């Protein structure tokens, strides 16, 4: 299982890296090819479709929960009923999404200026992209099945191929002189091909999972929706929370304030994606442990996953503290970190990351609540966090500074994480004192070592260009890796890892 976890986490990070690289190169190409108005319309279309995708009601995540649970108890018939019921519900929601897409495409020109752009071209693009967003939740069921069976490497392999095909297809149609509608069609085809490939793989790996109208059960639909809706509430609130402080800073300080603040949040989003690559892998493992009533497994997963997540998040946070200013100055320009025209984006980054990244690294407690189907409790805590963060960020942004808004958002995230942690400890019969001694204190010790190393790295490596920045980041990672392995892995796991590395090196030597 340890090898599968490492494989799946690394594949998640590889998929994220490929996506980031494609976005890095594709975004400026789209701006120059489409022009400001065309790119603006495409951005609006993508944003609108993001809201259309909310019609999934959290059902794909619910499929992961129950397929993993019934796979652990070897109840293929119940798993088939859940999947069949999910297909029915998502088919109905897809129809509603397509209708909504048509209405939005018809209304779009009434509320957006369309100077120099074909109205029909934009409407067709929004309609096709909306159809893609509407069908995606239904097509995500094979992905959910693969996730429930710990096959994230297959999900990511097909995802990388789809991303490359999509990027190549977009460049091809734009090179031939086509516009937004063609881009939307390429997106729809890429999504369908990717999900069909995953469906074929899921069918081969889970032949006992059946699909049919006769397997649809009201009880399965009620069980699925009763779980998924609350998880959907968590998702929506977090989507709103992700940018609420940015919106408030933009409202009180104008576009310049939003630009500085947005730079920090962009880097934080990348960090959250890296942490999410770990959390998603742990979810089906936690679910299976709860399904088998293995309390020891739930406790072990809570402790160890929290230690790994906190160590990962802490290293990223330390990187922001030591190298964030240099990175932003080189990436966006020195003006954004000088603090003359506006608060330094590097300072905002550190304050905002304290809650979003550092506290968010405690992935174990949330996965424990999800595994034990305590999603209603998680939703209540998240909603309370949203209300607290919104009110305090508004007051701090208005009467204090942008840093006040960042601090308020971080405080809300820390408070919510503390509540989730206390609740998960009670459910798994782990005392808070034990959690602190087994998770927080060892992680803080490891992060103190990494911090001291970063201080030394800064004294030795004085380059300020891209080469110097990446050398410092790489040196930080090289220091953090053995520290993390020592703190987060058992002796037998460290020995197995060393044997695997030695074996790979021997094979490489023979090949040469």
Image (cartoon, rainbow, N blue to C red):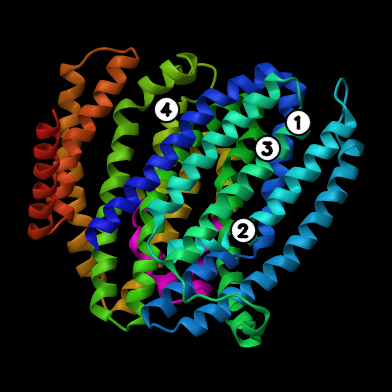
Of badges 3 and 4, nearer the viewer stands 3
Which quadrant would residue 120 be assigned to in this image? top right
The earlier-in-sequence mark between 2 and 3 is 2
Instruction: Look at mark 4 in the image and give the residue it sits on.
Output: 346
**Residue 426 visible to an observer of this rendering:** no
Of badges 1 and 4, nearer the viewer stands 1
Q: What element does badge 3 sit on?
A: helix
Which numbered marker is on residue 139?
2
Q: Residue at x 45, y 52 (%)?
A: 155
Q: Residues within 10 Å of mark 2 (few under 14, many from 20)?
A: many
Magenta stretch: give its range: 359-388
Q: Residues within 10 Å of mark 4 (few under 14, many from 20)?
A: many
Gap in Å between the C-alphas at discs 2 and 3? 17 Å
Which quadrant would residue 290 be assigned to in this image? bottom left
In the image, 108 versus 330, the foreground residue is 108
Gap in Å between the C-alphas at discs 3 and 4? 38 Å
Gap in Å between the C-alphas at discs 3 and 1? 10 Å
Which numbered marker is on residue 186?
3
Report if residue 443 lies within the magenta region. Answer: no
The earlier-in-sequence mark between 1 and 4 is 1
Gap in Å between the C-alphas at discs 2 and 4? 40 Å
Instruction: Look at mark 1 in the image and give the residue it sits on.
Output: 180
Q: Residue at x 39, y 67 (%)?
A: 284
Gap in Å between the C-alphas at discs 1 and 2? 23 Å
Q: Are marks 1 and 2 in contact (CB under 8 Å)?
A: no
């Amino acid at each position: 299982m340890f090898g599968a976890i490492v494989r799946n986490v690394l594949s998640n990070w590889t998929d994220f890296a490929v996506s980031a690289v494609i976005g890095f190169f594709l975004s400026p190409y789209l701006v120059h090819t489409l022009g400001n108005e065309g790119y603006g319309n495409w951005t609006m279309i993508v944003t609108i479709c993001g809201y259309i995708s909310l019609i999934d009601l959290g059902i794909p995540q619910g499929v992961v929960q129950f397929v993993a649970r019934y796979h652990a108890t070897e109840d293929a018939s119940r798993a088939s009923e859940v999947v069949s019921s999910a297909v029915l519900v998502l088919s109905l929601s897809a129809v509603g999404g397509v209708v909504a897409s048509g209405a939005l495409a018809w209304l779009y020109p009434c509320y957006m200026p369309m100077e120099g752009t074909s109205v029909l071209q934009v409407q067709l693009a929004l309609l096709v992209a909306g159809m893609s967003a509407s069908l995606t939740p239904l097509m995500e069921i094979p992905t959910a099945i693969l996730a429930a069976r710990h096959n994230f490497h297959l999900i990511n392999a097909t995802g990388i191929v789809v991303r490359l095909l999509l990027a190549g297809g977009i460049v091809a149609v734009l090179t031939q002189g086509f516009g937004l509608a063609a881009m939307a069609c390429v997106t729809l085809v890429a999504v369908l091909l990717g999900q069909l490939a995953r469906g074929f793989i899921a069918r081969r790996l889970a032949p006992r999972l059946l699909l049919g109208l006769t397997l649809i059960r009201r009880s399965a639909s009620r069980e699925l929706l009763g779980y998924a809706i609350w998880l959907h509430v968590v998702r929506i609130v977090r989507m709103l929370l992700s940018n609420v402080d940015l919106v408030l800073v933009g409202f009180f300080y104008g576009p310049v304030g939003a630009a500085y603040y947005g730079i920090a949040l962009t880097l934080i989003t990348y960090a959250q994606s890296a942490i999410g690559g770990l959390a998603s892998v742990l979810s089906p493992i936690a679910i299976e442990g709860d399904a088998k009533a293995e309390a020891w497994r739930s406790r072990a997963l809570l402790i160890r996953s929290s230690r790994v997540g906190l160590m990962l998040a802490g290293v990223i946070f330390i990187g922001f503290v030591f190298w964030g200013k240099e990175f932003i100055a080189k990436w966006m320009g020195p003006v954004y970190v000088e603090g003359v025209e506006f608060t330094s984006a590097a300072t905002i980054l550190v304050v905002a990351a304290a809650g979003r990244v550092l506290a968010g690294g405690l992935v174990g407690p949330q996965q424990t609540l999800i595994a034990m189907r305590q999603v209603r409790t998680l939703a209540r805590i998240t909603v309370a966090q949203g209300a607290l963060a919104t009110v305090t960020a508004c007051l701090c942004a208005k009467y204090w500074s942008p840093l006040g808004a960042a601090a308020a958002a971080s405080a809300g995230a820390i408070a919510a994480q503390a509540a989730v942690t206390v609740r998960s400890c009670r459910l798994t019969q782990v005392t808070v004192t034990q959690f602190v001694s087994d998770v927080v204190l060892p992680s803080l010790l490891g992060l103190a070592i990494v911090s001291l190393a970063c201080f030394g790295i800064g004294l030795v490596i004085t380059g300020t260009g891209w080469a110097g920045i990446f050398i410092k980041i790489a040196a930080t990672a090289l220091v953090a890796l053995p520290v993390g392995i020592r703190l987060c892995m058992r002796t037998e796991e460290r020995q197995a890892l060393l044997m695997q590395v030695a074996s790979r090196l021997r094979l490489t030597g023979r090949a040469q």
